[in-house]
Amino acid sequence: MREYWVILRAELFGLFISPATYVASFYFLSLLAIGFRFFIESFTATDWILPPLSSLVVGLVFGSPGLIPFLTMRSFAEERRLGTLETLMSAPVGSISLVLGKWSASYLFFLIICGFAFCFPALLHFLFPEQGETLGFTQYEQWIGAWTFLMIFGASFTSVGIFASSITKNQMVAGMLSFTLLTLYLSIMAFSFGESSSLNSIDNFSDFWNACLGSFGHGLHKLQHFSVGLIDVGTIFHQLILSFLFLSLATLQVERLNH
């Protein structure tokens, strides 16, 4: 357990001193802030069913392919390129601790950036209390549900990035692979949104396929539940399985490189 904390501290320090992460975070938050401002101005004139806070979560989730590769692409690719991974593995550090430490650092940094994004509605409510109450920023169940949704999807997204970094020596290749996998992930979720198939009964192959996809196909549907404070355990379980899968694949890849 001690080696896990050593890896976590070292990776967090590397992220905090890396110019690339600050540049990516700045542009990510700037574009998100601009989009949030225009969305709030036009919210009353639209028929958008999600509350503004959950709409911010949608922006964070669908914008993550432009951010997470910058947080994860150096994790193993740079170690392999410099030849320091072999040196690190010769130390008393297990593969599981190594993968979990690097993933935890990227995940925590992602949550920190999301925390800054959540300052947008908090600042709006502080400056304009009446408008903030009208937009639902005083309903704590929305904050809890939105943050929970963001945490579970952020966990699986960063695990995808760690896996992509573990299979190549090139940072750019790792970043592009992570971007591609996350884009495919979100494309399935977006294209499945609006399909009215019931998961309670499976009558045809389409219903069976949608049931197998889990939160791949119904992530945005479940966000409607999270947005009012209804935590869906099935979605959490599915995202935990995905995180475990990609982290396990990354661990196996590290083990293979060590032998």
Image (cartoon, grey):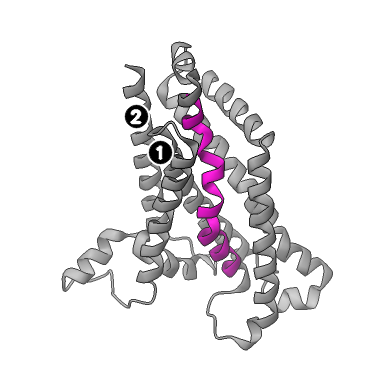
**Relative to residue 20, is residue 212 drawn left or right?**
left
Query: Is residue 135 shown in magenta?
Result: no
Q: Nearer the viewer, residue 144 or 169?
A: 169
Which amino acid lies under the numbered mark 1 shown in the image of this protein? Phe
Please tell me the numbered disc located at residue 201: none
Instruction: Assign the magenta stretch its main secondary structure.
Output: helix
Residue that label 2 marks? 253
Question: Mark 1–mark 2 contact, CB under 8 Å?
Answer: yes
Residue for point 28% across, 69% down = 199
Q: Is residue 90 visible?
A: yes
Residue that label 1 marks? 163
- Could you say where residue 17 lies in the image, as x and y percent from the top left? 69, 33
The residues colored magenta run: 54-79
Q: Nearer the viewer, residue 215 or 180?
A: 180
Residue for point 44% across, 67% down = 220
Task: Please tell me whether residue 100 is drawn above or below residue 72 in the rendered image.
Answer: above
